[in-house]
Amino acid sequence: MIIVVSPYHLTTREPAALAAMLLADRVVTMLPAPLEGKAWGDVRGAAVRVPRYLEFMQSWQWTVPLWKEGVIASGIDGDEAASRLRPVCERIDRDPGLAPLRLLMKPDLFEDHERYLDSLARDLLKAGPDPGITVPVAAGLDAFAMQHGVMVARSEPKSVVQKAEAELGRQVFAAAVPVLLQADAERILEARELLSDELGELRAAMDRASELARETPNSEKLKGLLAGPVKKYADAFEAEREELLGAAEDDDVRIVEGTVMLTGMLLPPDCVFASSLRAMKAMGPMPTAVEEQGTGMRELPGKVGKPVEVMSLYVRVLGRPAVARR
Protein backbone atom coordinates (compact mmCIF):
# COMPACT_ATOMS: atom_id res chain seq x y z
CA MET A 1 0.00 0.00 0.00
CA ILE A 2 1.51 3.27 -1.16
CA ILE A 3 0.17 6.58 0.14
CA VAL A 4 1.08 9.92 -1.41
CA VAL A 5 1.69 12.57 1.25
CA SER A 6 1.90 16.33 0.77
CA PRO A 7 5.29 17.89 1.54
CA TYR A 8 3.35 20.46 3.57
CA HIS A 9 2.06 17.71 5.88
CA LEU A 10 5.54 16.24 6.19
CA THR A 11 7.03 19.63 7.08
CA THR A 12 4.45 20.38 9.78
CA ARG A 13 4.22 16.74 10.94
CA GLU A 14 0.47 16.63 10.37
CA PRO A 15 -1.50 13.59 11.61
CA ALA A 16 -2.08 12.65 7.96
CA ALA A 17 1.68 12.31 7.44
CA LEU A 18 2.40 10.50 10.73
CA ALA A 19 -0.46 8.05 10.18
CA ALA A 20 0.67 7.33 6.62
CA MET A 21 4.27 6.69 7.69
CA LEU A 22 3.08 4.03 10.11
CA LEU A 23 0.29 2.43 8.11
CA ALA A 24 1.62 2.42 4.53
CA ASP A 25 4.17 0.11 2.98
CA ARG A 26 5.68 3.23 1.51
CA VAL A 27 5.01 6.95 1.51
CA VAL A 28 5.72 9.04 -1.58
CA THR A 29 6.07 12.80 -1.32
CA MET A 30 7.04 15.66 -3.60
CA LEU A 31 10.70 16.38 -2.88
CA PRO A 32 11.65 19.95 -3.82
CA ALA A 33 14.93 19.65 -5.68
CA PRO A 34 16.98 21.81 -8.05
CA LEU A 35 15.54 21.90 -11.55
CA GLU A 36 18.90 20.74 -12.90
CA GLY A 37 18.64 17.46 -10.95
CA LYS A 38 18.43 15.86 -7.50
CA ALA A 39 21.94 14.43 -7.39
CA TRP A 40 23.76 15.14 -4.13
CA GLY A 41 26.03 17.70 -5.80
CA ASP A 42 23.04 19.62 -7.20
CA VAL A 43 21.22 19.61 -3.86
CA ARG A 44 24.31 20.64 -1.90
CA GLY A 45 25.04 23.46 -4.33
CA ALA A 46 21.45 24.69 -4.16
CA ALA A 47 21.53 24.66 -0.35
CA VAL A 48 24.60 26.90 -0.44
CA ARG A 49 23.05 29.32 -2.92
CA VAL A 50 19.52 29.39 -1.47
CA PRO A 51 19.51 29.79 2.35
CA ARG A 52 15.78 29.17 2.63
CA TYR A 53 16.15 25.87 0.79
CA LEU A 54 18.82 24.85 3.30
CA GLU A 55 16.42 25.77 6.12
CA PHE A 56 13.72 23.63 4.51
CA MET A 57 16.05 20.65 4.10
CA GLN A 58 17.03 20.97 7.77
CA SER A 59 13.34 20.88 8.73
CA TRP A 60 13.15 17.43 7.11
CA GLN A 61 16.29 16.17 8.84
CA TRP A 62 14.20 14.11 11.28
CA THR A 63 12.86 12.01 8.38
CA VAL A 64 16.30 10.85 7.14
CA PRO A 65 16.10 7.36 8.76
CA LEU A 66 12.74 6.81 7.04
CA TRP A 67 14.23 7.71 3.66
CA LYS A 68 17.18 5.40 4.27
CA GLU A 69 14.84 2.50 5.11
CA GLY A 70 12.71 3.14 2.03
CA VAL A 71 9.61 4.12 4.01
CA ILE A 72 9.61 7.52 2.31
CA ALA A 73 10.46 8.00 -1.36
CA SER A 74 10.18 10.82 -3.88
CA GLY A 75 8.73 8.72 -6.67
CA ILE A 76 7.67 5.33 -7.99
CA ASP A 77 9.81 3.29 -10.39
CA GLY A 78 11.87 6.31 -11.39
CA ASP A 79 8.85 8.57 -11.87
CA GLU A 80 9.28 11.59 -9.59
CA ALA A 81 6.20 13.13 -7.97
CA ALA A 82 7.78 16.57 -8.43
CA SER A 83 7.71 16.08 -12.21
CA ARG A 84 3.96 16.81 -12.18
CA LEU A 85 4.39 20.39 -10.93
CA ARG A 86 5.39 22.05 -14.20
CA PRO A 87 2.67 20.33 -16.35
CA VAL A 88 0.02 21.44 -13.86
CA CYS A 89 1.22 25.05 -14.04
CA GLU A 90 1.24 24.85 -17.84
CA ARG A 91 -2.28 23.43 -17.76
CA ILE A 92 -3.51 26.35 -15.68
CA ASP A 93 -1.83 28.78 -18.07
CA ARG A 94 -3.49 27.38 -21.21
CA ASP A 95 -6.88 25.98 -20.06
CA PRO A 96 -9.67 28.58 -20.51
CA GLY A 97 -11.68 26.92 -17.75
CA LEU A 98 -8.91 27.64 -15.26
CA ALA A 99 -8.38 31.28 -16.24
CA PRO A 100 -9.38 32.71 -12.81
CA LEU A 101 -6.63 30.67 -11.15
CA ARG A 102 -4.00 32.50 -13.19
CA LEU A 103 -4.49 35.50 -10.94
CA LEU A 104 -3.02 33.41 -8.12
CA MET A 105 -0.22 31.70 -10.03
CA LYS A 106 3.47 32.54 -10.41
CA PRO A 107 4.04 32.63 -14.19
CA ASP A 108 7.81 32.95 -13.83
CA LEU A 109 8.17 30.18 -11.21
CA PHE A 110 10.38 27.96 -13.40
CA GLU A 111 12.37 30.69 -15.14
CA ASP A 112 14.94 31.07 -12.37
CA HIS A 113 16.22 27.95 -10.58
CA GLU A 114 17.08 29.70 -7.35
CA ARG A 115 13.79 31.62 -7.23
CA TYR A 116 11.93 28.35 -7.83
CA LEU A 117 13.57 26.67 -4.83
CA ASP A 118 13.22 29.75 -2.66
CA SER A 119 9.49 30.06 -3.44
CA LEU A 120 8.78 26.40 -2.69
CA ALA A 121 10.89 26.35 0.46
CA ARG A 122 9.36 29.55 1.80
CA ASP A 123 5.84 28.30 1.26
CA LEU A 124 6.51 24.88 2.79
CA LEU A 125 8.08 26.42 5.87
CA LYS A 126 5.06 28.70 6.29
CA ALA A 127 2.67 25.74 5.88
CA GLY A 128 1.20 26.94 2.61
CA PRO A 129 -0.17 30.49 2.63
CA ASP A 130 0.38 30.98 -1.12
CA PRO A 131 -2.17 29.33 -3.48
CA GLY A 132 0.26 29.99 -6.32
CA ILE A 133 2.28 27.13 -4.86
CA THR A 134 -0.23 25.04 -2.91
CA VAL A 135 -2.69 24.57 -5.77
CA PRO A 136 -0.12 23.23 -8.28
CA VAL A 137 1.47 21.02 -5.61
CA ALA A 138 -1.88 19.50 -4.59
CA ALA A 139 -3.05 19.04 -8.18
CA GLY A 140 0.31 17.55 -9.12
CA LEU A 141 0.17 15.01 -6.32
CA ASP A 142 -3.34 13.98 -7.36
CA ALA A 143 -2.18 13.56 -10.97
CA PHE A 144 0.76 11.44 -9.82
CA ALA A 145 -1.47 9.29 -7.61
CA MET A 146 -4.00 8.74 -10.41
CA GLN A 147 -1.22 7.76 -12.79
CA HIS A 148 0.03 5.08 -10.41
CA GLY A 149 -3.30 4.01 -8.90
CA VAL A 150 -2.37 4.87 -5.31
CA MET A 151 -4.01 6.80 -2.48
CA VAL A 152 -3.45 10.43 -1.48
CA ALA A 153 -3.51 11.36 2.21
CA ARG A 154 -5.62 14.39 3.06
CA SER A 155 -6.06 16.17 6.37
CA GLU A 156 -9.41 16.91 7.99
CA PRO A 157 -11.17 19.59 5.89
CA LYS A 158 -11.02 22.92 7.71
CA SER A 159 -10.50 25.69 5.16
CA VAL A 160 -13.11 26.87 2.67
CA VAL A 161 -11.23 25.20 -0.18
CA GLN A 162 -10.77 21.92 1.70
CA LYS A 163 -14.46 21.75 2.59
CA ALA A 164 -15.47 22.54 -0.99
CA GLU A 165 -13.17 19.77 -2.18
CA ALA A 166 -14.56 17.19 0.26
CA GLU A 167 -18.10 17.98 -0.92
CA LEU A 168 -17.13 16.76 -4.39
CA GLY A 169 -16.23 13.29 -3.14
CA ARG A 170 -17.99 10.01 -2.51
CA GLN A 171 -17.23 8.15 0.72
CA VAL A 172 -16.44 4.49 0.17
CA PHE A 173 -15.08 3.27 3.50
CA ALA A 174 -14.19 4.41 7.00
CA ALA A 175 -12.24 2.87 9.86
CA ALA A 176 -10.94 4.09 13.22
CA VAL A 177 -7.40 2.97 14.09
CA PRO A 178 -4.78 3.88 16.70
CA VAL A 179 -1.60 5.54 15.42
CA LEU A 180 1.38 7.55 16.61
CA LEU A 181 0.49 11.21 16.22
CA GLN A 182 3.87 12.44 17.36
CA ALA A 183 7.07 10.41 17.22
CA ASP A 184 10.59 10.49 15.85
CA ALA A 185 11.65 8.41 12.86
CA GLU A 186 13.23 5.65 14.95
CA ARG A 187 10.02 5.13 16.95
CA ILE A 188 7.98 4.93 13.75
CA LEU A 189 10.36 2.30 12.38
CA GLU A 190 10.13 0.33 15.64
CA ALA A 191 6.33 0.47 15.55
CA ARG A 192 6.27 -0.75 11.96
CA GLU A 193 8.43 -3.71 12.98
CA LEU A 194 6.42 -4.56 16.11
CA LEU A 195 3.12 -4.47 14.21
CA SER A 196 4.41 -5.81 10.90
CA ASP A 197 2.07 -8.81 10.63
CA GLU A 198 -1.09 -6.88 11.48
CA LEU A 199 -0.03 -3.94 9.31
CA GLY A 200 0.45 -6.33 6.41
CA GLU A 201 -3.13 -7.57 6.69
CA LEU A 202 -4.49 -4.05 7.11
CA ARG A 203 -2.58 -2.76 4.10
CA ALA A 204 -3.81 -5.61 1.92
CA ALA A 205 -7.41 -4.98 3.02
CA MET A 206 -7.17 -1.24 2.36
CA ASP A 207 -5.66 -1.84 -1.06
CA ARG A 208 -8.47 -4.28 -1.87
CA ALA A 209 -11.07 -1.82 -0.59
CA SER A 210 -9.59 0.88 -2.83
CA GLU A 211 -9.85 -1.41 -5.85
CA LEU A 212 -13.41 -2.47 -5.10
CA ALA A 213 -14.51 1.10 -4.36
CA ARG A 214 -14.18 1.98 -8.03
CA GLU A 215 -16.27 -1.04 -9.01
CA THR A 216 -19.09 -1.01 -6.46
CA PRO A 217 -20.92 1.58 -4.34
CA ASN A 218 -21.62 -1.07 -1.67
CA SER A 219 -20.01 0.49 1.41
CA GLU A 220 -21.21 -2.36 3.66
CA LYS A 221 -19.16 -4.85 1.65
CA LEU A 222 -16.10 -2.65 2.01
CA LYS A 223 -16.76 -2.18 5.71
CA GLY A 224 -16.84 -5.95 6.18
CA LEU A 225 -13.60 -6.30 4.26
CA LEU A 226 -11.81 -3.96 6.66
CA ALA A 227 -13.42 -5.01 9.95
CA GLY A 228 -11.22 -8.03 10.71
CA PRO A 229 -7.82 -6.51 9.82
CA VAL A 230 -8.70 -3.27 11.65
CA LYS A 231 -9.56 -5.17 14.83
CA LYS A 232 -6.41 -7.31 14.64
CA TYR A 233 -4.26 -4.23 14.18
CA ALA A 234 -5.96 -2.32 17.01
CA ASP A 235 -5.60 -5.32 19.35
CA ALA A 236 -1.92 -5.65 18.48
CA PHE A 237 -1.35 -1.93 19.04
CA GLU A 238 -2.93 -2.24 22.48
CA ALA A 239 -0.88 -5.34 23.31
CA GLU A 240 2.34 -3.54 22.37
CA ARG A 241 1.32 -0.24 23.96
CA GLU A 242 4.04 -0.24 26.60
CA GLU A 243 6.74 -0.88 24.03
CA LEU A 244 5.27 1.57 21.52
CA LEU A 245 4.83 4.43 23.96
CA GLY A 246 7.63 3.82 26.43
CA ALA A 247 9.98 6.78 26.78
CA ALA A 248 13.59 6.41 25.70
CA GLU A 249 16.54 8.64 26.51
CA ASP A 250 17.27 9.27 22.85
CA ASP A 251 13.71 10.27 21.89
CA ASP A 252 13.79 13.55 19.96
CA VAL A 253 10.13 14.29 20.68
CA ARG A 254 7.55 13.20 23.21
CA ILE A 255 5.54 10.24 21.97
CA VAL A 256 1.84 10.96 21.40
CA GLU A 257 -0.70 8.35 20.33
CA GLY A 258 -4.31 8.71 19.37
CA THR A 259 -7.12 7.26 17.32
CA VAL A 260 -7.75 8.56 13.84
CA MET A 261 -10.70 8.07 11.54
CA LEU A 262 -9.52 6.97 8.12
CA THR A 263 -12.12 7.86 5.51
CA GLY A 264 -11.63 6.67 1.96
CA MET A 265 -13.22 8.98 -0.59
CA LEU A 266 -13.25 9.00 -4.37
CA LEU A 267 -12.78 12.53 -5.69
CA PRO A 268 -13.07 13.85 -9.26
CA PRO A 269 -9.77 14.09 -11.19
CA ASP A 270 -9.83 17.89 -11.10
CA CYS A 271 -11.08 18.30 -7.54
CA VAL A 272 -8.24 20.67 -6.60
CA PHE A 273 -9.06 22.99 -9.49
CA ALA A 274 -12.82 22.71 -9.01
CA SER A 275 -12.70 23.46 -5.27
CA SER A 276 -10.29 26.37 -5.79
CA LEU A 277 -12.56 27.86 -8.44
CA ARG A 278 -15.59 27.34 -6.23
CA ALA A 279 -13.85 29.12 -3.35
CA MET A 280 -12.87 32.01 -5.63
CA LYS A 281 -16.46 32.29 -6.84
CA ALA A 282 -17.68 32.45 -3.24
CA MET A 283 -15.36 35.41 -2.66
CA GLY A 284 -16.72 37.40 -5.60
CA PRO A 285 -18.03 37.29 -9.20
CA MET A 286 -15.92 35.60 -11.87
CA PRO A 287 -15.92 36.20 -15.64
CA THR A 288 -19.01 34.74 -17.31
CA ALA A 289 -16.91 32.58 -19.64
CA VAL A 290 -15.57 30.51 -16.78
CA GLU A 291 -18.33 30.77 -14.22
CA GLU A 292 -20.10 27.54 -15.20
CA GLN A 293 -16.88 25.54 -15.46
CA GLY A 294 -15.78 26.76 -12.08
CA THR A 295 -18.71 25.41 -10.12
CA GLY A 296 -17.02 22.09 -9.46
CA MET A 297 -20.15 20.25 -10.62
CA ARG A 298 -18.66 19.06 -13.89
CA GLU A 299 -15.34 17.74 -15.06
CA LEU A 300 -12.85 20.32 -16.24
CA PRO A 301 -11.28 19.62 -19.66
CA GLY A 302 -7.76 18.39 -20.35
CA LYS A 303 -7.10 16.21 -17.33
CA VAL A 304 -3.56 15.72 -16.07
CA GLY A 305 -2.89 11.99 -15.67
CA LYS A 306 -5.23 9.08 -16.31
CA PRO A 307 -9.01 9.78 -16.52
CA VAL A 308 -9.86 8.11 -13.22
CA GLU A 309 -10.96 9.32 -9.81
CA VAL A 310 -8.57 10.22 -7.03
CA MET A 311 -8.64 7.74 -4.15
CA SER A 312 -8.16 9.94 -1.11
CA LEU A 313 -7.58 8.95 2.49
CA TYR A 314 -8.83 11.59 4.90
CA VAL A 315 -7.24 11.46 8.35
CA ARG A 316 -9.16 12.97 11.28
CA VAL A 317 -8.02 12.78 14.90
CA LEU A 318 -10.69 11.48 17.27
CA GLY A 319 -10.83 12.58 20.89
CA ARG A 320 -7.89 13.80 22.92
CA PRO A 321 -4.43 12.43 21.99
CA ALA A 322 -2.60 10.57 24.77
CA VAL A 323 0.92 11.71 25.65
CA ALA A 324 3.33 9.00 26.74
CA ARG A 325 4.80 9.42 30.21
CA ARG A 326 8.50 10.06 30.54
Image (cartoon, grey):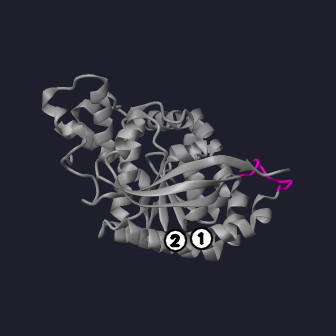
Q: Quadrant of residue 145?
A: bottom left
> Is residue 71 shown above or below 229?
above
Going by the image, does 15 lie left or right of 87? right
Tell me the CA gap for discs 1 and 2. Answer: 6 Å
Q: Residue at x 52, y 43 (%)?
A: 8
Q: Is residue 309 magenta?
A: no
Question: Does residue 41 show up?
Answer: no
- What span is in magenta? 247-256
Left or right of residue 111, residue 45 in this image: right
Q: Residue furthest left?
A: 289
Residue 156 placement, left or right of 253: left
Nearer to the camera, 15 or 92:
15
Relative height, residue 35 to residue 20 (above, below): above
* Amino acid type at image mark 1: Lys
Find disc 2 in the rendering and name its residue: 227
Mark 2 is on which residue type?
A: Ala
Judging by the rendered image, the residue that carries numbered circle 1 is 231
Kindly check if marks 1 and 2 are in contact, taking CB atoms under 8 A apart as contact. Answer: yes
